[in-house]
Amino acid sequence: MLTHRILSVLLVLGSLLPQASAGAAPGSSPQAIQLGSSLAPLDGPWRFHTGDDPTWADPAFDDSGWESVDLTAPPGAHDPDVGLSGYVPGWSARGHAGYKGYAWYRLHLAVIAPAGSTLALAGPTLVDSAYQVFLDGKLLGGIGDFSGATPVVYTTQPRMFPLPQSLASLEASHVLAFRVWMGAELRLTPSTEAGGIHMAPALGESSSIEARCRLQWLQTFCGYIHEVVEALLFLLLAVMTGSLMTFDRLNRSSYLWLSAAMVLHALHRGNLAFAFWTHYETFQEFELFNFVLISPLYLGGWMLAWYSWFRLRDAVWIPKAVAVLTLLFVVARFLSGSWFDGVFHSLVTTGLQYLVTCIHLLFLLLLTLILYKGIRQQARETWFALPAVLAVSTGLFTAELSFLHIPGMWFPFGVGISRTDFAYLAFGPLMFAVLLRRLWSHARPMPTAAPTPIRIGAATA
């Protein structure tokens, strides 16, 4: 990205370390000038091994028999979510497909830096799913809670770790080690490139490392700010929808269901940013709230909202079908959650995943039927609302659209925006037009009949 490149150039220029006099006497040969670097990416090659053993943090441990892993990213590579640069595939794409659990990365270092330098380490910004970092066997920190039998996972974020000045000495070799954990957290978003470190850490002067982390935080913020915008948009539309009940009491149920669906959807979108900007919510809490509860509820809410909006009074079985599908969806999502990893037989786990997919398809078929009946019974109303219905449904049924090989992510200005985000941002003005039309039809004064003339004449005898 242009911003990232400009900042990188400024960081390098600000840390130039002239090793010889820049001036030269007239007529003398030019002198060599060695330029230093503000930070150095630790691309490796790293030593890598699956499994877990506390002795692997020991600098004296012999890791010569381990695999060699290069974390050098190809030019222009970025992560598939917010667009952070430097993305590399994980261990699933490096011969360990399907592996879950612990793995270790080790790198032998010999560092030299100007006297008095304050050094720091920029942790890997994207890791599946939690990690601890050790320098010469001493724990520096990490992301995730490793105090229990199974690590508690949070979203990975830019992280800076101060380093001792004793590191900057060519006379000693040091060992940097990462202990990485990946459990069943990625079951909801499976990937053939999952596992381990996806972005190389970096070592350098504290000011430069801090600037790098700030830039990555800015990208992370920009990558999820549109979720907050969408949440506010849904809430504003919910308020506008609720106001229609004052003018149109005959269709209160449709406004109630539409408002409920929008509020639930706003909670879902807003919680995405909350989970990735903070560490107040563990991944399992995020999974339980967003995927087990909110997603099925707002999906059922949208079905009932459109059923009521198009006044499909003859299809009385639809609300019952929506209630049953929503309940089954919650139960299937809960039983297939990461907290049950390893509890059920693999056939049961696969069956639950197929059940989730089938329920989602049934919701899609139900929406298609609602639109079909709406066009037949309320053609004008349905056609006017159809663009808004299709826009929000693009986000509701994103998995089904992916089967059609429609791109799911775009990166305008280096910021990742999904197909779902574009659809929800388009839904806002479309739904506003639908609500404004309904509001206008009920708020305008009804025409009054013309007064009947009364003729007053002379009384007859």
Image (spheres, rainbow, N blue to C red):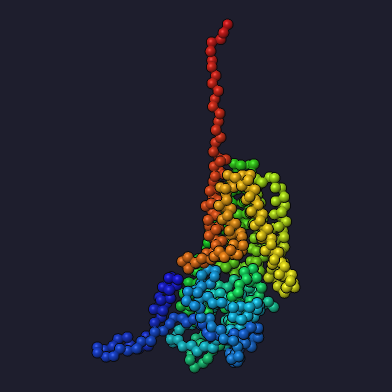
- Counting from the top left corner in percent of width and height, residue 86 is at 50, 76
The residue depicted at 53 percent of the width and 83 percent of the height is 70
* Image spot of residue 132 (x, y percent): 60, 80
In the displayed structure image, the side of residue 79 where residue 153 appears, left or right: right
Q: Quadrant of residue 69?
A: bottom right
Q: Is residue 164 above or below residue 458?
A: below
Residue 440: horizontal and vertical position, in percent? Answer: 54, 42
Q: Quadrant of residue 175?
A: bottom right
Q: Residue at x 67, y 54 (%)?
A: 366
In-front residue for pair 358/261: 358
Examine the rendering and report whether any part of residue 301 can be seen: no
Looking at the picture, does residue 155 appear above or below residue 372? below
205 to the left or right of 438: left
Where does the N terminus fall, quadrant-wise? bottom left
Residue 436 horizontal/vertical position (percent): 54, 46
In the image, is 247 to the left or to the right of 329?
left
Quadrant showing the C terminus: top right
Tell me if residue 360 can be seen: yes
Residue that appears at 72% across and 50% down:
317
Residue at the image point whose x is 72% and y is 70% from the top: 349
